[in-house]
Image (spheres, coloured by chain):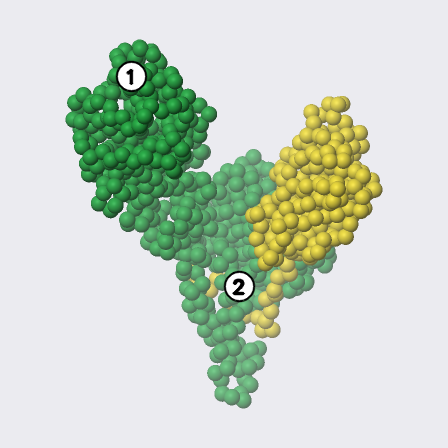
Chain colours: A yellow, B green
Amino acid sequence: MAGASFVASTRGTFDATAKAVTLVTPAAVRKGDVLVALLAHNAADPRGSVPHGWTQINTQGAEADVLDVYARMIADSEPSSVDFHFTTVANECQGALVAFRGTAPGVLLEHAATVASAATTTLATAAPSSQQAINVILSVWTCAGSQALALPAGLTLVDSFSTAIVAARSMLVGYRRAGATGLITLGNVTVGSGTSSDVTSGRSFSFTVRDRLPVQPAALVDLVPGNIGLIGKDTRRVR
Amino acid sequence: MSAVVLLRFNESGKLQPSDTLGNLADLGTEAGIVAPSRVTAWTGSGRRFLQAGVTGLIAPDVSGNGTLLQRDATIQALISLTLSGATGAQTIIARGLNDGTASERYAYGLELEQQAGSPGFVEVRWFWQDEGGAIKTQAPGVFRSPGDGVELMLTATRRWESTSRVVVRYYVADELIAELVSPDGSIAGGTTGRTTIGARKAAGAYGRHLNGVLDELLVTDNELSLEEIRHTWKRLTEYQPGGVETFAALTPPGSVWAKNLGNDVGKRVKIVGELLGLAVAGAEELRALLLPDAAPLELVERWEAICELSASPGDSLDVRRTRILSYLARDEGFHLAAVQAALAGPMALDAGLVQLLEFTNTITDDFSGGIAAERWFDGGGAVWSTVAGELHAFAPAGAFVRPESRATPFLLASAEPGRLYVAAKLGPGALSTLPIGAFYGLVLHNRAANDWLWFGIANLGGDPTVAYRTAVAGNAPGPYAPLDVPVTDGPSWIRIASPQRASGGGGAALTVSYSRTGPSDGFTDVAITSAVPSSWAWAGFAITSDFEPLPEAIAVSFDDFVLHNADSDRPYLWYAFRDPTVDGRPDMVGAQRLVQKLKPVYTHAAAVMSKSVRCDDPRDGLCDQGPLGAL
């Protein structure tokens, strides 16, 4: 078991008329994979009901930068897309769908962290905590305006895009293997060329995605000691 | 695979523990550590290490290189932990004392630590030092402790692949709990380094003491596979207890003396039963590990020898197993993925980068990708180029493009005896400027006999006309045979075909067809039955002029070339192409050998590093034996 692994992603399509973000299921997924939907919106635009078959596993952020996280395991018959509705869409809504392999939604999310950045050309990155080194860190940044966001070193890009159906906003998604336990420090995101013309406000979200809880091993139990141990035959090298 | 250290800890409490394999001297103590006490454990006895008691053991190697492992290694332990009261990292084993000298750097070590924020959860992690002396503690595997004093089997493996890539795995019981890739491929250590058990020494001081009971400790010089670890676990927990139960069940009904394994008779029953279980485990080991999908390293090496496959030094066990399975799976059919996986090793590529070039007996070229140099032979005399996905030909005024010149045509090597079908589109826009006496169209050519057949549009006395002409045995071309009234500007579609029935190729009969409507309809067919050469080796395009030098420039265009050789051998050709621009050190000789073993007998195949035909290199499979190389 090497932990959860990234499979594929798709970018959401925002329809202001339908008040929904549509996420298409990636073609590369197969039964047992877990879809993680990341929906970014303004707190003033409340989320609608959770689509059938999906579970809202987390929500982070406030005001202009809220991120809802939903999960679903791929079944035998999978719809080609899903719509995430909002009660109002006075602001831009964005979304991305990320598929992982080897995960179970029930224990999917181990930790979440968020940090806001205001009037900056460098978005701070939330530092997640990871119990296992094999966990995956999924990081999302959202900010106002149409901005080019540079992924911090060590992360693999999932998607980076800007939309302006209602008002220009940008979203960046990346991931990496935790590679360590405890608090995982990630680099910050540079906005555009990092000059004063690129000042924006936004928020970073980091999630620790795990494959499963740490296992508890079976024990060697015998009321009467005296068992043959690790090697039952002589395998010493020729000397 | 060889075990290099096996500590059973079954010596009397009055004796120093010793390495069963004899590579370590008897373990002892020195200033700073106290000998652990002998206690009862699952295999009979073990040693209790106590942090508070600063316990530990130390031993030098008996012989040079006895326990030094700087690449692959496995540490396996039967151990019980006492997390209560323990703090910090706990060392199981460390090979080296880290005293600042190169010879005492840690070559390998394994330690445990309860997670600070998650009581009851334990991290297990490798550590070693690099050549500069920096300690490289690896990312851990994490498991939930089964409880203080509960014995478990713990395994950590290390596979060194390069100076920048090491794969570590951690197992508890028979479960893989983590696989991680590390960049710390620089691993130090010296032949005179000493080994500590239950504590780690650094700069002359002991620390990181273990708090638990070590029942057995094994170090091997290879990466144990999941299947081997799983089999060991099943031997310990299923086969051997099963043997005891079997033997005990053989005692007379109603007797109780054999059921109590704690009395003298019962202990003998247990010994015999365990041996029965050991024999069963041996048989089950064959069943579990013999076939290449789960074979351990030494059996994989035998499978490779049987299959005559080669492995690179850095190949992991998984890669080598996959290669063998791919080779064996060839009998199940011609599976591209399996062939790619098999060739990935010798070609030093990811399987997905191994290009398998396959062919049909139809060649199409719409020139959207330019002019493929390997396919087209430029006879000279004209300038050939592609513009907006069309093939353009241009001959300037004054050029020499007499039809009998071999330098004129622009040809394709067809070289397929038998039935022929060749078609193309003649571009518009040229007819109003086509000089008198000029021609553009398809051409068939027997280069050995110097036979020609031209078919296309010729300007006959000022009227562009669909026409053909032939030249046989190097003689001057005959006159044009006009087939249609003068044509107006616009595209034309023309084709030349032999009879397509099974024995229809190679004869002296061809049909030329032309259409002003489209590529698949509106054709007028004209049979040519006299003065028709055969055995066409080349087919393609040509521009010619009866005038020398060319009084006016010729500028024409072509597109949508189709050549179908019904009797072609091309469907039976395939090439495994290794892009030479991709990094890596391919073993093309090995790849070629593998291709020859993998290929179905009715195919011609070669491992190549060029898509151009190379006619003189047996290592590339003598690809000139195939008519068209790798394109």
User: Which residue is rendered at x = 46% and y = 64% of the image?
Assistant: A232
Query: x, y percentage for residue B21?
Result: 46, 57
User: What is the C-alpha distance between the residues marked 2 and 1?
Assistant: 94 Å
Dot 1 lies on which element? loop
Q: Residues within 10 Å of mark 2 (few under 14, many from 20)?
A: many
| Amino acid marked by disc 1 | Gly
User: Which residue is rendered at x = 48% and y = 59% of the image?
Assistant: B228
Q: Residues within 10 Å of mark 1 (few under 14, many from 20)?
A: few
| Amino acid marked by disc 2 | Trp
- In the rendering, which numbered label is found on residue B233? 2
Query: x, y percentage for residue B77?
Result: 56, 58
- In the rendering, which numbered label is found on residue B461? 1
Query: Which chain is home to disc 2?
Result: B
Query: Which chain is home to disc 1?
Result: B
Dot 2 lies on which element? helix
- Is residue B539 visible in the rendered structure shown here? yes
User: Which numbered disc, 2 or 1, marks the residue closer to the eye?
Assistant: 1
Query: x, y percentage for residue B612?
Result: 33, 31
Using residue A10 as the reference point, say whether residue B475 is left or right of it: left
Residue A112 or residue B549, whichever sits in front: B549
- Is residue B211 visible in the rendered structure shown here? no
* Residue B148, image quadrant: bottom right
User: Which residue is rendered at x = 75% and y = 23% of the image?
Assistant: A197
